[in-house]
Structure formats: structure tokens, C-alpha cells
Amino acid sequence: MQAKYKRILLKLSGESLAGEQKTGIDFDTVLKICEPIKKLVEIGVEIGIVVGGGNFWRGRSSGKMDRTRADHMGMLATSINALGVCDALEQLGVDTRVQTAISMREIAEPYIRGKAVRHLEKGRVVVFGCGTGNPFFSTDTAASLRAAEIEADIIVKATMVDGVYNCDPKKYPDAVKYDTLTFDEVVEKQLAVMDGTAATMCRENNIDIMVLSIENPMNIYDAVCGLPVGTLVTNK
Ligand code: GTP
């Protein structure tokens, strides 16, 4: 198959790395998620990855901690995930680099946009850790920021649901899935695609988002090859 997009930003939720165990990292699950990534690299797709951290830390949502400190803990959680994804990719023979938004030079490269782009051009997958490096921002916002910086053609948001619905499909069995949506519709209908900051960044920078289920990781490969998978959110 031929890829529809040359450079993508893949957003992986922390939960997607936990598999059945729901918390921490299930390495077999991570390896499965990395298979389509390897296949995409083989057909010449350049891939940046932003990972979430919810499999280790959801302290922010408890409301019991200082928000900034809770977000710092979340950023550390994403860096653990970044190293896990990097290790799985390397086991599959994919060249990788980890770059973190908060400097931890003994463990990973610091985020430098120009270096990240060079790595991509050389066929390396770059895994971005620590979100944006700032509290009060989600890893979805980090995905939209990095996508804008590296000039990605699309964000592929791999989550636990297979697209965007008009209401919560877990609560309402008659929920209807959208094939495509505009960012204006997302805002107007208050659809939970990503948080407002991330959606605004994508809208203002004309970055499309493909939302798809990670349950079948090959969805990632199919979507990047242009097959109809998940929901496409676009300005067009
Ligand atoms: P080019 O040679 O520029 O194509 O890229 P490269 O990443 O191979 O070169 P570099 O010499 O920068 O890096 C060699 C190895 O050291 C790679 O595995 C990098 O990820 C790693 N590395 C580079 N800078 C840092 C850093 O600040 N901290 C850590 N922990 N590793 C680094």
C-alpha cells in the first residue's frame, strides 16, 4: 500500500499502553501498537509520537493536589511511556530517538525542533515526552503543538473509542459515529474529541485529526494509507 500522508504525528494515550491490566505498561500491547508504526516507516512515512501518561498518573483529576505539581508528575509519567515505546520500536528494528520537553539529558535528548525534523528525515521515529513541558496543558495540546512545529500532515489520535460520536457510545447504544467533522462542528456540538486548547491549535494551524481505535492497532496503518477508519476532523 502507499501512504496518503508523508509525515504524521501519532498521539497515543497512556491507557492504550496498559492493555488489559489498565495501569502501567503491558509490553506485549506496546509491541502490537508498534507493528503498524514499523510498517509505516517501511513505506517511507515520517512519524513523531506524543504519548500520554494516564496509565501511570491521573492525579490532576482528583482535585486534591496542587495542579502544577500534579501536572509535573503527569509529565514524568509520559517520559516513562516514551522510553517504553522507544524500546518496543527498537526491538522491532525501528530506529528511534526520544526527546523530552523537560530536560533530563542523562535519559533522553532535549526537545530541539530542528534535530527532531532531521531525525524524521533520516527515517527515525521521534517519541516526544513530557507533553509541552508546561503545567495546565494536556498531551493532546502537546500533540497539536508538535504537529504544527514539525509540519505534520495529520494527527492520528489513537484512543479507546473508534471515532467521534454524537453522544457517549458507552452510555447511549444508539449513538451515531461521524465519518468527518469540521472543527466548528466539534466546538458547536461540544464533542469530546480533544480539549479546547488542542482543538483550537489544530483549527488555527489547519491540522487535520484522525480519531481511531487502538483496539486494532492496524487501524493506524490503514488510516495513514487513506482507508476509511475512525473520524476525520478537518477545516475543509
Ligand atoms: P545525527 O548524527 O545528527 O543524525 O543524529 P544522532 O542522534 O545519531 O547523533 P547524536 O550524536 O546527537 O546522538 C547519538 C546518540 O546519543 C543518540 O542515541 C541520541 O539519542 C543520543 N543523544 C544525543 N543527545 C543526547 C542527550 O542530550 N541526552 C541523551 N541521553 N542522549 C543523547
Image (cartoon, rainbow, N blue to C red):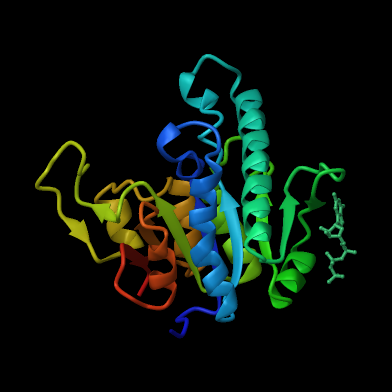
Instruction: Give x and y (percent) for residue 101.
Output: 73, 47
Residue ranking furthest to the top? 64
Quadrant for the C terminus, please.
Answer: bottom left
Residue 7, placed above or below residue 157: below
Q: Residue at x 13, y 40 (%)?
A: 172
Q: Quadrant of residue 133?
A: top right
Instruction: Give x and y (percent) for residue 130.
Output: 67, 43
Q: Residue at x 59, y 24 (%)?
A: 67
Residue 157, placed above or below residue 23: below
Q: From this viewpoint, is residue 132 visible?
A: no
Instruction: Give x and y (percent) for residue 227.
Output: 33, 76
Q: Quadrant of residue 81?
A: top right
Residue 15, placed above or below residue 180: above
Instruction: Give x and y (percent) for residue 23.
Output: 49, 31
> Relative to 192, is 168 on the left or the right?
left
Quadrant for the N terminus, please.
Answer: bottom left
> Relative to 5, is 93 on the left or the right?
right
Ligand 1 quadrant in view: bottom right
Q: Nearer the viewer, residue 78 or 71?
A: 78
Q: Residue at x 50, y 51 (%)?
A: 12
